[in-house]
Image (cartoon, rainbow, N blue to C red):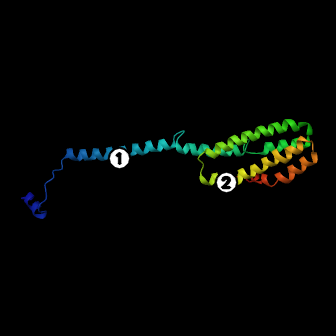
Amino acid sequence: MRSGSRDAIRPGATKVKITIARLLTLFALVVGAGAAAVIGSQGYALSQLKVNGPLYKDIVGGKDLIADILPPPMFLVESYLLANEAAIHPDLIGRNLERIAALKAEYDARRDYWKAFPLEDALRDKLEKEVQPTADLVWRMILGKFADAARVGDEAGMHARRWTNCRKPMRHTATRS
């Protein structure tokens, strides 16, 4: 009579027998799906965070850029100091101009490297719109008018070029964050 009263409440209902075996199977499926989801998300996280993974490369790239800007070759202080030294000690002009040319070659190699490196847009804008134009101006001054004056021994020309053309461009180096 009990089963008849159930059918009266739900006409057309099919009888589903829920046994302990079916409940255990359903429980195992839910636990298995959850475990698969956890393992899958862990695998994805590890693939993103591992050494040489995408996030690691972004971090290393940012650190490499900072390292290239602060010490040589992308930080121009050594070249500027060599130019000042040559102006003060004319006997060092030849040696210092050779070293400045080598530093320029290193700078150009790193500039090409960063041009091809996938940087974040904000970092690339800062590099291309602030650091590189300033560096280009300094390089033009050192390798152009300053080097010309140094080669002919024009001490007054060397002193005038180094102070009037380099002080303002070098300001970005003092505002590191």
User: Going 91% across and 36% down the picture, which residue do you hit?
Assistant: 91
Q: Where the N terminus falls, by quadrant?
A: bottom left
- Residue 67 shows in this picture: no
User: Which of 10/103 is in front?
Assistant: 103
Q: Which residue is outermost to the bottom?
A: 9
Q: Which residue is drawn at 75% across and 41% down?
A: 104
Farthest left residue in view: 1
Amino acid type of the residue that numbered disc 1 sits on in the rendered structure: Gly
**For mark 1, what is the residue?**
34
Q: In this view, does 92 lie above or below 138?
A: above
**Which residue is outermost to the top?**
95
The percent position of residue 103, horizontal first and vertical second, equals 76, 39
The answer for how far apart the CA atoms under marks 2 and 1 are is 45 Å
| Residue annotated with mark 2 | 126
Dot 2 crowding, Cα within 10 Å, few <14, some 14–19, many 20+: few
Q: Is mark 2 on a helix, strand or loop?
A: helix
